[in-house]
Amino acid sequence: MSISNYAENKILDHLAGVTTWTKPTNVYIQLHTADPGENGTENAAGYSARQISSWNAAANGSISISSSIDWPNVNTTETYTHWSVWDAEVSGNCLWTGALTANVAIVSGESFQITSLTLSID
């Protein structure tokens, strides 16, 4: 897992009192077919629709999704290996990236679901 350069700078500026970081209205997850890079812009899945996510409150240096994230009726056949977290459904800023626990091969017409995702700073 990797915090994006954008989020690192926003966190540091916020914690040091340089500027306030306004929380995103929603947070979205995007799928990738290989490492998306620290800024989440590489290897986006062919079915690149970002899905909204809900999160529990952070505790002990980590935060986890509060409900599953679903990609219904995927329109491409590919293998998902990574994810990225964004502050917008389209464009926006990448906040975090990481690898799935296992690669998942999807055939066009199938659905995909992430049931567990935890981000940690420790």
Image: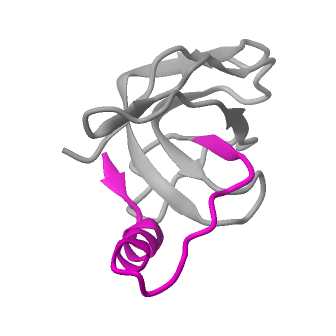
Image quarter of the C terminus: top left
Is residue 2 placed above or below 34 in the rendered structure? below
Residue under the point 45% across and 66% down: 7
Residue 88 point in image, percent of width and height: 73, 56
User: Between residues 72 and 89, which one lies in front from this camera angle?
Assistant: 89
Mark yes or no: residue 47 visible: no
Residue under the point 37% across and 69% down: 8
Is residue 45 placed above or below 115 in the rendered structure? below
The reply to whether the magenta stretch includes residue 63 is no
Mark yes or no: residue 81 visible: yes
Q: Residue most toward the left?
A: 122
Q: Which residues are magenta?
A: 1-30
User: Between residues 29 and 111, which one lies in front from this camera angle?
Assistant: 29
User: Between residues 12 and 91, which one lies in front from this camera angle?
Assistant: 12
Q: Is residue 59 left or right of residue 114?
A: left
Image quarter of the N terminus: top left
Residue under the point 72% across and 35% down: 51
Q: Quadrant of residue 93?
A: bottom right
Q: Residue most toward the front?
A: 17
User: Between residues 103 and 68, which one lies in front from this camera angle?
Assistant: 68
Residue 18 point in image, percent of width and height: 43, 87
